[in-house]
Image: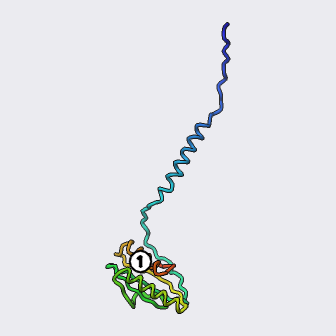
């Protein structure tokens, strides 16, 4: 007996199952690698003038200046003053201790203090961030950065 062979007609539909598998593998790869791409980005910021920070006239203003030799100067007054200096500290712990005392005295008097940091352009970013960490230890919640117009 001879076998009768049935011829199958060619299927004109595309089999998309392998494409779906490839798509899901690529999706997992992108989901795993995307958070790793945001760890460090080099940014060259343009030099532009910025808007002035709003000042509350009922608050005292503490202006902290960091010089190139990493010494700290500050002035406590009714407005931002970058020219005067009322006190200075040679190290970060001394500055933190002094700011803690200023903040404690202001709380006792019922006054709020706005804190602004002004850093010399020769001071490295780490010194400014260390000063901000010291201010956080001293109980300062908000800090403004002072820049000069180009």
- Residue at x 67% of width, y 17% of height: 6
Q: Quadrant of the image for the C terminus? A: bottom left
- Residue at x 46% of width, y 86% of height: 62
Callout 1: 10 Å neighbours few (<14), some, many (20+)? Answer: many
Outermost bottom residue: 109
Of the pair 77 and 135, the residue shown nearer to us: 135
Q: Quadrant of the image for the N terminus? A: top right
The answer to which quarter of the image holds residue 123 is bottom left
Of the pair 24 and 136, the residue shown nearer to us: 136
Residue 63: percent from left, percent from top: 44, 85
Q: On the rendered structure, is 68 left or right of 19?
A: left
The answer to which quarter of the image holds residue 147 is bottom left
- Residue at x 44% of width, y 69% of height: 46
Outermost top residue: 1
- Residue at x 66% of width, y 15% of height: 5
Of the pair 20 and 150, the residue shown nearer to us: 20
Color theme of the render: rainbow
In the displayed structure, 46 sits above or below 104; it is: above
Secondary structure, mark 1, is helix
Q: Which residue is mark 1?
A: 131
Residue 58: percent from left, percent from top: 55, 90
Residue 32: percent from left, percent from top: 51, 51
């Amino acid at each position: 007996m001879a076998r009768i062979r049935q011829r199958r007609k060619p299927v004109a539909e595309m089999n998309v199952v392998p494409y779906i598998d490839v798509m899901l593998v690529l999706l997992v790869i992108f989901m795993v690698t995307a958070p790793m791409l945001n760890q460090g980005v080099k940014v060259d910021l343009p030099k532009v003038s910025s808007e002035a920070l709003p000042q509350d006239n009922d608050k005292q203003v503490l202006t902290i200046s960091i010089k190139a030799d990493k010494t700290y100067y500050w002035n406590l007054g009714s407005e931002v003053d970058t020219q005067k200096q009322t006190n200075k500290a040679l190290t970060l712990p001394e500055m933190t201790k002094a700011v803690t005392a200023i903040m404690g005295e202001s709380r006792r008097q019922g006054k709020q203090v706005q804190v602004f940091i002004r850093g010399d352009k020769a001071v490295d970013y780490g010194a400014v961030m260390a000063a901000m960490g010291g201010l956080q230890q001293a109980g300062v919640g908000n800090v403004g950065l002072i820049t000069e117009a180009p």
